[in-house]
Amino acid sequence: MPETMPDPFNGDKLRRDRNARGWSQSELGRAVGTTGNYISKIERGTLPGKGLRKRIAEVLEKGLPMDNQRKTDEQEILAAYRKLSGINKARAHAYITALTHSQSPALNRP
């Protein structure tokens, strides 16, 4: 039977911290080397091992690795794009197309 988490590490706080940063359970899971399903279990009371607790604390302190952050940024951009009206979507698409076909050095940065 899984242990329940004593303070100071508890699932409710982990959920609040993760949500405050706008991260999904899957994003946090990838960043710490586990699955989103296991993050869900932790948030519901399963006590992870010391190594995973340490990795979670480090990621909460430092933020997601760049790969995960880039995916989060792309998701936010797509969500904003989907909210645009038809004419504004067309304008945004034309603008993005022009940017991606330009030789702008800003687009070549990681």
Image (spheres, rainbow, N blue to C red):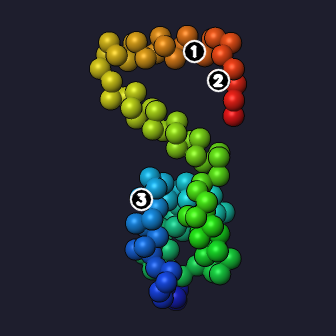
Q: Residue at coordinates 46% horizontally, 79% vertically from top-left?
A: 10
Give amino acid for label 1.
Leu
Residue found at x 52% / y 86%: 2
Q: Which mark is residue 91?
A: none
Q: Secondary structure at mark 1?
A: helix
Chain-order first, disc 1 or disc 2: 1
Q: Which residue shows up at 55% across the image and 59% down it?
A: 28
3D distance between C-alphas at marks 1 and 2:
8 Å
Given the image, on which type of amino acid does mark 3 rest? Asn
On the image, which quarter does residue 13 sit in? bottom left
Q: Is residue 30 visible?
A: no
Q: Are marks 1 and 2 in contact (CB under 8 Å)?
A: yes
Observer-nearest residue: 34 or 50? Answer: 50
Residue 24, given in percent of the width and then of the height, sits at 48, 55
Location of mark 3 (residue):
19
On residue 99, the disc is 1
Number of residues whose C-alpha sits closer than 10 Å to that of mark 3, classed few (under 14), some (14–19) or many (20 or more):
few
Of the 4 image quadrants, the one containing the C terminus is top right
What whole-number distance in Å separates the C-alpha atoms at marks 3 and 2?
30 Å
Which residue in the structure is indicated by mark 2?
107
Question: Does residue 97 appear left or right of residue 86 in this picture?
Answer: right
**The quarter of the displayed image where residue 47 is located:** bottom right
Label 2 crowd bin: few (<14), some (14–19), many (20+), radius 10 Å: few
**Circle 1 residues within 10 Å: few <14, some 14–19, many ≥20:** few
Residue 74 in sight: yes
